[in-house]
Each structure stands twice: as C-alpha cells, then as structure tokens.
Image (cartoon, rainbow, N blue to C red):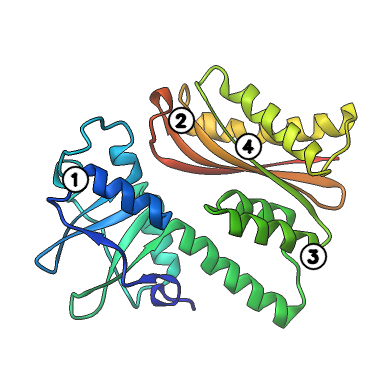
Amino acid sequence: MMLVKDIMTADPITINPNATIMEAEKILSINKIGRLLVVQNNRLVGMLTDGDIISEQDLQAPVKDFMSDDLITINVNSTVQKAAKKISDNRIGGLPVFDDKDKLVGVVTSEDIVYGYLKEDEEEIEMEKKTITPESSAIYLCMTRSRDYEKYWLEKIEGYGYRGAITQTGASAEKLPIKLRESTTVAAIAREVISENSREKMAISNAVKDAYSQLDLINPGLGGGFKIAVVRGEGHVSVAIFGKFGHALVDGPEQLTVGTSVI
C-alpha cells in the first residue's frame, strides 16, 4: 500500500508570515507551484495558496493577513488513500506532512496523489499487462500543471493507441457550457483527435455535456477557469474537466469531472 512519504514533496518551499504578497507571488511563479507553507521560528503557522492572493492589489501587504492558519495535516506514514480523503472532504489542494516527532517534513498535494495513483497503475500494468483507459488518461492529462507533463502525457497515451488533446478556458456561469464545448472541439480537431464532421463533433459535445452536468450539479450558477482534456479510445471519447469554481472567475474550490460519449 502506497504511503504519503512515497509521493510527497520533501523539504517544501516555505515563506515567513511577515513577507510581502509580492515576495510570495514571485516564489509561486518561479517555482511553478500553487501553495506555500508559512513558517516562523521553525514552526508551521499557516498555508498560503495562489487563490488566497489572486485579487489582492496591495503587493506590500504581509502574507500573515491572507494565509490560512486552521491547518489540516497528515502523518508521513499515512496511506495515500487517507490523504486523498482528507483533501476531498475538506475541499483543499494540499496537506503539510509531519513525521512521528511532529517535525514538518513535506507537503502532499492533490496532484501528487494523482501521480501516486499513476505510479501504482504503471506497476500494475507491468505485472498484469494491463493498459490505462481513455478515462484515466484524460484525468491525468487535465490535471497536469506544466508544459513538460502535458507533453509527457500526450506522448504516453499515444503509446497506448489513444489520441489526446488539452486546452483551457474560463467563463462566467452562463457562457461556461458553450466555452467548454467550443474550446474542447477546437483542440480535438487541431490535434486530430476527431475529424471535422458533425458526427464526431457531436460526440465531443455530448462528452463535454456529460462532464459539465456534474459540475453544474455540484456548484450551480458559478463560472470558473478550467483545464479540459479529451482522449479518444476505441469507439468512444472521454473528456475530463479540472479547475476552480468562483464568482467572476475568482478562484474557488477545485473540482474534477469526467464525461464519455460513443464516437
């Protein structure tokens, strides 16, 4: 059984609570990460995410005014399943990781967990000669946060005989269903996942509609910014949507949904 210590980021990047928002934004940007652990006198006092400061105009304001100090943590020897449940139940993106001596040793994020499951899948594939599905491929692809991982996954799924594409979009609540469908269709055509005929376009549209209906059921009336992946397998397509809801495109809770359609 995979443990948190197997997938966490050790020696996480930290920041002082008296540092400025400008300093925090610079660290987040340079390291291409979405959260910082706030540490003072070798003690964890909070967590700051990119969503906490996305709309802040005063760049000289201190980090301590925006960080979350009601922290949910996990032990380094806990299972990945337990970490995933904590993240899901509390609608957060990551957990500080402590050892048995209450020392901060790392951070584990929802992305780490996805890659952890991927690693487990790959081990099973080697042992049982199984292949990943278009649905899981779309999930992995839409949850990537860097160009390198996007390229890696696009090439990897081709090795399984699938074709994939990825795109991003953001819109208000009333425009979101159309934007999701349009951007996914354009990306699918550009990457030759589908051809420009009405039947295949309709298959993409139905898969997006399936995934969007889940989003709308969870958070009706909210817009957001999302990454969308579409993967074509034998006889069907799968669409995965991952991103954050919010009012007027301000970051909110992350959601992941999957839709499928016969092609």
Please name the amino acid that badge 2 sits on: Asn
| Distance Cα–Cα, label 4 vs label 1 | 39 Å
Amino acid type at mark 1? Thr
CA gap, disc 3 and disc 1: 46 Å
In the displayed structure, does residue 221 sit left or right of residue 149? Answer: left
Determine whether, in the image, residue 40 is placed left or right of residue 35: left
Gap in angstroms between the C-alphas marked 3 and 2: 36 Å
Question: Tag 2, which secondary structure?
Answer: loop
Q: CA distance from mark 3 to mark 4?
A: 25 Å
Percent x, y of residue 72: 25, 57
Numbered mark located on residue 84 in the image:
none
Quick one: SS at disc 1? Answer: loop
Question: Which is more N-terminal, label 4 or label 2?
Answer: 4
Looking at the rendered image, the disc whose residue lies closer to the viewer, 1 or 2, is: 1
Sequence-first tag of 1 and 2: 1
Label 1 neighbourhood size at 10 Å, few (<14), some (14-19), many (20+)? some
Q: In the rendered structure, which amino acid carries the disc numbered 4?
A: Ala
Q: Which mark is drawn over residue 20? A: 1
Could you say which quadrant of the image residue 31 lies in? bottom left
**Of callouts 3 and 4, the N-terminal one:** 3
Of badges 4 and 1, nearer the viewer stands 1
Q: According to the image, label 2 marks what residue?
A: 219
What is the x, y in percent for residue 231? 74, 48
User: Residue shown at 60%/31% (left/top)?
Assistant: 213
Residue matched to label 3: 159
From this viewpoint, is residue 34 visible? no
Disc 3 element? helix
Work out how far the residue at label 2 is from the one at label 4, CA to CA, in angstroms. Answer: 13 Å
Q: Looking at the rendering, which quadrant does residue 226 occupy?
A: top right
Q: Which mark is residue 211?
A: 4
